[in-house]
Image: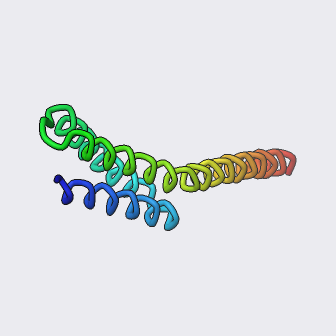
Amino acid sequence: MHTDLFNQIRYLTQQAIILLNEDKIEQCNIVLAKRQSLLEELKSKHDACLENKKEFTDKFVELMKWIQQQDTPAIINATDKKSQTIKNSLTQIKTKKALQQYKNAI
C-alpha cells in the first residue's frame, strides 16, 4: 500500500539531513520541496482511500512521527548554523567598519 511513496519520503528526509550537515542549504531546500510534494500526494491518496483506511492511517501517522523525530535535531542544527552565520556576519561588519575608520585616520 503506497510503500514506494513512504520509502521515497523517508529517503528524502535522510538526504535533507545529510545535505544540511554538509552545509548544502540550496540542495537541502530542493530535497525538502520534493518531500513536501510527496507528502501532499500521500495525503491526497490517504483522503481518497476506501480500502484498509485504518492501516493506511496508522502507517501515515507513523511516518509523520518519524519525520518529526528526524527533523527536530536537524532544525536545531540549522538554527545553530543560522546564529553562527549572523554572528560571523556581525563580526565581519565590525571589522570592516574598524578598517575603514583606520584608513580614514591615516
- Vertical placement of 69 versus 22: above or below? above
Residue 30 at x, y percent in the picture:
32, 51
Residue depicted at x 68% and y 53%? 84
Q: How many marks?
A: 0
Residue 53 vs residue 9: left or right?
Answer: left
Question: Nearest the camera: 40 or 46?
Answer: 46
Say how the picture is coloured. rainbow
Residue depicted at x 72% and y 46%? 90
Question: Nearest the camera: 43 or 78?
Answer: 43
Find the residue positioned furthest to the right: 105
Residue depicted at x 76% and y 45%? 97
Residue 63 vs residue 72: left or right?
Answer: left
Residue 2 at x, y percent in the picture:
17, 53
Residue 65 vs residue 37: left or right?
Answer: right
Residue 103 vs residue 42: left or right?
Answer: right
Residue 9 at x, y percent in the picture:
30, 55
Residue 13 at x, y percent in the picture:
38, 57
Residue depicted at x 45% and y 48%? 65
Question: Nearest the camera: 92 or 29?
Answer: 29
Question: Nearest the camera: 47 or 103?
Answer: 47
